[in-house]
Amino acid sequence: MPSTLPGVPDIDESLATSIVERLAEIESRLRDSVATSDDMVRWTGRHLMDAGGKRVRPMLVLLAASLGDVEADGVVEAAVLVELTHLASLYHDDVMDSAPTRRGTDSAHALWGNNVAILTGDFLFARASALSARIGVDAVRQHSETFERLCLGQLHETVGPTVEDDPFEHYISVLSDKTASLLALAGDLGASLSGAPEGTASVMRRYGEKIGVAFQLADDVLDLESDAHTSGKTPGIDLREGVPTMPTLLVRRRAQEQQDARSLEIVRRLDGDLGEDASLAELVALLRADPALEETRELALRTSDEAVEILSELPEGPVREALIAFTTTLVQRSR
């Protein structure tokens, strides 16, 4: 029978039911975790939470925990922890990227300004840190290490590669820190807190690292292919801010190596003024028709295949099949 797990079709019905029930609990706990008597933060702290989201990271915690005892102490708290940390990072990312929208609504900084958005993100990070302390010392350590990687990933993206760095290796490193690190934490915490068999947490951490990179490469494709209505984000917003993506890196390499007119024109536009919506839309249209978009999609699929290969180290059964379906959903999604 088809599963009722959001976005992940055709998995074991009892497993799906178990996860859906806990996702509802996690949603309630998320709201409780940002409750405050402060009138301002009461609204800003819930802004992106109320806008919804796929809850990918909590779902991975629960799937990993299903390899042990999903009802074990700390599992639900870990799912809340990773989602709170993710939400906090979004407030900061939108300021860095000057993103006008997020999840189909105005971004926090567009509504209240950069300072309020940054401080709201800090508030959520503080609440996440308090939650990690309640889970235990290992959770505190892992969460702090992940927080460090999130900061380093954003820093390295902002500064860019040095002349000695390979731009592609640098970009994958940024994706690993900014996106994959939190998925790795989700897989590790879910497995370790559930009492899953020895070695499972390591497998889930490596899986999270790999699927995180694939997830972000797929997002590079979606950033160009989707529209604001379906994705909740302005198409090509990274282009306007000069943030590298895999398609633009591929085009720049081709322009340098082949000097073809199409690639050179795209690079000229990438380096030009994209302040006007019309200019940005024209560049997005050129990139949508460029082979670099399909190359990026294929790279995302190859990386997800590598993630599935890591899952082969887990015992056969409904949880492994669900994780494989989860992998496919993340990389082949349309929003």
Image (cartoon, helix red, strand yellow):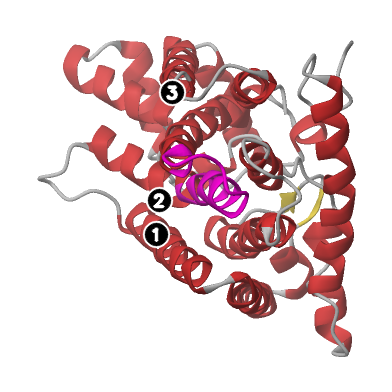
Amino acid carrying label 1: it is Arg
Which residue is nearer to you in this view: 89 or 158? 89
- From the viewer's perspective, is 48 left or right of 133? right
The answer for how far apart the CA atoms under marks 3 and 1 are is 26 Å
Q: Secondary structure at mark 3?
A: loop
Which residue is tagged 1?
149
- C-alpha span from label 3 to label 2: 24 Å
Q: Amino acid at mark 3?
A: Glu
Residue at the (51%, 51%) spot, across then down: 185
Q: Give the quadrant of residue 122.
A: bottom right
Q: Look at the image and give the residue range highlighted in magenta.
A: 181-201
Quarter of image, res 299: top left
- 258 left or right of 4? left
Q: Is residue 37 above or below residue 314?
A: below
Mark 1 closeness class: few <14, some 14–19, many ≥20 residues within 10 Å: many
Q: Residue at x 41, y 20 (%)?
A: 306
In this view of the protein, which residue sits in the foreground, 270 or 138?
Answer: 138
